[in-house]
Amino acid sequence: MFMGEYQHSLDDKARLTIPAKFREELGPAFMVTRGLDRCLFVYPQKDWETLESKMRAMPLTRADARQFIRFFFSGAAECELDKQGRIVVPGNLREYASIDKDCVVIGVGARVEIWDQGIWKSYTENVENQFSDLAASLVDLDL
C-alpha cells in the first residue's frame, strides 16, 4: 500500500526521484498517466493490467466511456527507474499537471500521485476546509 507525502523537484532533464518507500512496490517499470484533479496517476504494472482489462470491458457505444478511455490511455507512458531511483516525466504529462520544478509525490493506497507543489497546496487547503463535511458524506460507504 502506498502512503505518505514527499516533496521533490524535477532536475534540468525532467527527472523526478521516486521516494524509496514506493520503488519496491512499483517495480523497475510502471505506468504514469493523466489523473483526475490535474495530477498524474502512477500504477504498478500488475494494477495497470487489471485497470486496462476493466476499461476494455466498457461499452464503446457510450460516449462518456470512449472519451475517458481515450484521454486516460493516450496520456499513458511506461517509465523505468534509473540507478538513482529517478524517472523522466514525459513532456505531455508535465504540461497536463502543470509540473515545472517543485512537485509532491503522494501515496494514495493502490496508486501514487504526482502533483505540482502549488496545485497540491491549493487542493489540500480546500479539502482541509471541507474535511468534516466530506467525512459525513462518506458515512454510507461504511468506512
Image (cartoon, helix red, strand yellow):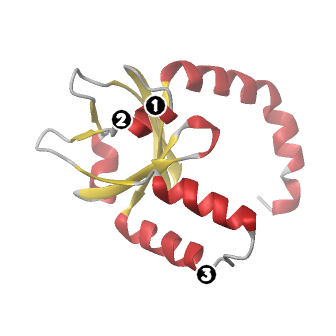
Residue 135 location in percent, x, y? 82, 44
Kindly identify the amino acid type of the residue bearing the numbered disc 1: Glu
- Give percent across and percent down for residue 15: 25, 32
Position of residue 90 relative to residue 62, above or below, is above
Q: Position of residue 47 (x, y in %)?
A: 44, 68
- For the residue labelled by badge 3, is the local secondary structure a helix, a strand or a loop? loop
Q: Amino acid at mark 3?
A: Ala
For numbered disc 1, what is the local secondary structure? helix
Q: Are marks 1 and 2 in contact (CB under 8 Å)?
A: yes
Q: Is residue 37 above or below residue 14?
A: below
The circle drawn on residue 95 is 1
Q: Which residue position is annotated with label 2?
A: 91
Observer-nearest of 89 and 3: 89
Q: Secondary structure at mark 2?
A: helix
Can residue 21 be seen here? The reply is yes
Q: Using residue 42 as the reference point, say whether residue 127 is left or right of it.
A: right
Label disc, if present, on residue 114 of the rendered structure: none
